[in-house]
Image: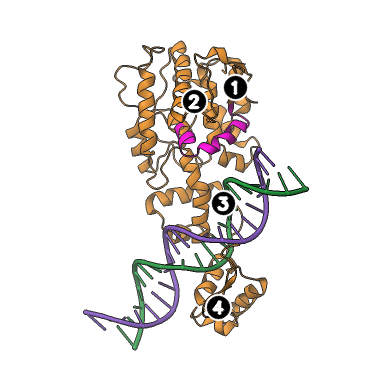
Chain colours: A orange, B green, C purple
Amino acid sequence: MGKSPGSDKNGLKKGPWTAEEDQKLIDYIQKHGHGRWRTLPKNAGLKRCGKSCRLRWTNYLRPDIKRGKFSLEEDDVIIQLHSVLGNKWSTIAARLPGRTDNEIKNYWNTHIKKKLLRMGIDPVTHTPRLDLLELSSLLSSSLYNSALNPTGFVGNIGPMFNPNLLSLATAFMSAPNKNMENCNNPGSIQAQNQTGNFQCQNQVESFQGNQLQNPVQICPTSSSSSTVMTQILQANSNHFSANQTLPNLWQLDDYVNNYSKGFLPMQNYGYYPDSNQSIISSSTDQNQACLTENIPCLNPLGSILPTPSSSSTPLNSSSNTYVNNNCTSGITEDIERDSYCSNMLMFDARNVKGCM
DNA sequence: AAGGGTAGCAACCGCCTGTCA
DNA sequence: ATGACAGGCGGTTGCTACCCT
């Protein structure tokens, strides 16, 4: 792994460490301590530069290194510390015993960054992505003005921020190729333009595409993202209008303020659990059962992040439990970690009339 | 089964900062 | 005050393993 094997101009070896080199380094440091790293390799009989020895020791050989997957709690700590400290990996590592800065940096780049992007959050600023906000705003205004929904959203609402739009937009804009995965994931929706059938795979009974004004191709194989988004929103607007229910849209200012204070209402991603405002709860009992049985936990960070008391969404409502119950129902950690995107699609699938 | 694509991560690179003479 | 050196840090590279077609 790592760099290709070889030697530099001084005859010092580069590339992956061998077990023999590791043992030499361990033996030397256990006997003498590392002392000056520059002189260590010579004293230890290693043809490595001191810097390489230091990195090998601190990132891999140190006895207190904690191996294995990061826990959800560690995820939370990393995200919160990163929101305050930025890319100060060593400072963040100091708060996570046994984890190295390099390990945290790699984990951030390969896991958490993607997770935040999928959630529509800029991993650098920890605020909603501006490009997606623009799209969300554009699409929202289009939705409000839709002839299909003349009364549902207009009025004194003002510019709103719907995290579901943002999430969905993220799914299409930030990682378009990934969406093919989502289409194949359990819980995702799969539209088939050719047949007109529109299915919510595994999660709910299938329903016919003719219940939509426009059959939708969720998987963006050929149509543009914005077209897909518009169609999804139109599908949603049909539902909202039919139920005369104002969706619990999320005020951007509240979001930014809460998030900047560490109050990220993660529980809102993908679901509106409040019975008075919920899209989900306006469905039939039968479909409630469907949701109860099939919705994976969407709140892997909620265990640490506090619930915003001032949120426009009453997160502590009793109807919230059907989501949380599933957090402990045998779903693997990996699925919890990585299910954001598919869950976001699930949300929209359920919003569509006939899927409920 | 094979080939291509991608994710994960160990290791390197180069810059920055602190220390000391 | 300043220059050299050591160590620290964040970003990047590239190999391996795994997944998908």
**Callouts 1 and 2 close, C-beta under 8 Å:** no
Q: Chain of mark 1?
A: A
Q: Point out the image quarter for the C terminus of chain A.
A: top right
Badges 4 and 3, same chain? yes
Q: Residue A345 versus residue A60: which sits nearer the camera?
A: A345
Badges 3 and 2, same chain? yes
Q: Which mark is residue A192?
A: 1
Residue A111 percent location from the top left of the image:
53, 48
Quadrant of the rendered image containing residue A98:
bottom right
Q: Mark 4 or mark 3, which has the lower sequence index?
A: 4
Task: Using a 10 Å C-alpha cutoff, classify the residue at mark 3 as few (fewer than 14 neighbours), some (14 to 19) or many (20 or more).
Answer: few
Residue carrying label 2 = A273
Q: How many marks?
A: 4
Q: Chain of mark 4?
A: A
Q: Point out the image quarter for the N terminus of chain A.
A: bottom right
Label 3: state its secondary structure: loop
Please name which of the two marks, 3 or 2, marks the residue nearer to the observer. Answer: 3
Q: Which residues are magenta?
A: A169-189
| Left/right of residue A23 with respect to residue A263 in the rendered view | right
Residue carrying label 3 = A70
Name the residue rendered at 49%, 51% in the picture. A109
Please name which of the two marks, 1 or 2, marks the residue nearer to the observer. Answer: 1
Magenta span main SS: helix
Please name which of the two marks, 4 or 3, marks the residue nearer to the observer. Answer: 4
Residue type highlighted by circle 4: Leu
Q: Chain of mark 3?
A: A
Residue type highlighted by circle 2: Pro
Residue carrying label 4 = A12
Q: Confirm whether residue A315 shows in the render.
A: no
Name the residue rendered at 39%, 39% in the picture. A129
Task: Using a 10 Å C-alpha cutoff, classify the residue at mark 4 as few (fewer than 14 neighbours), some (14 to 19) or many (20 or more).
Answer: some
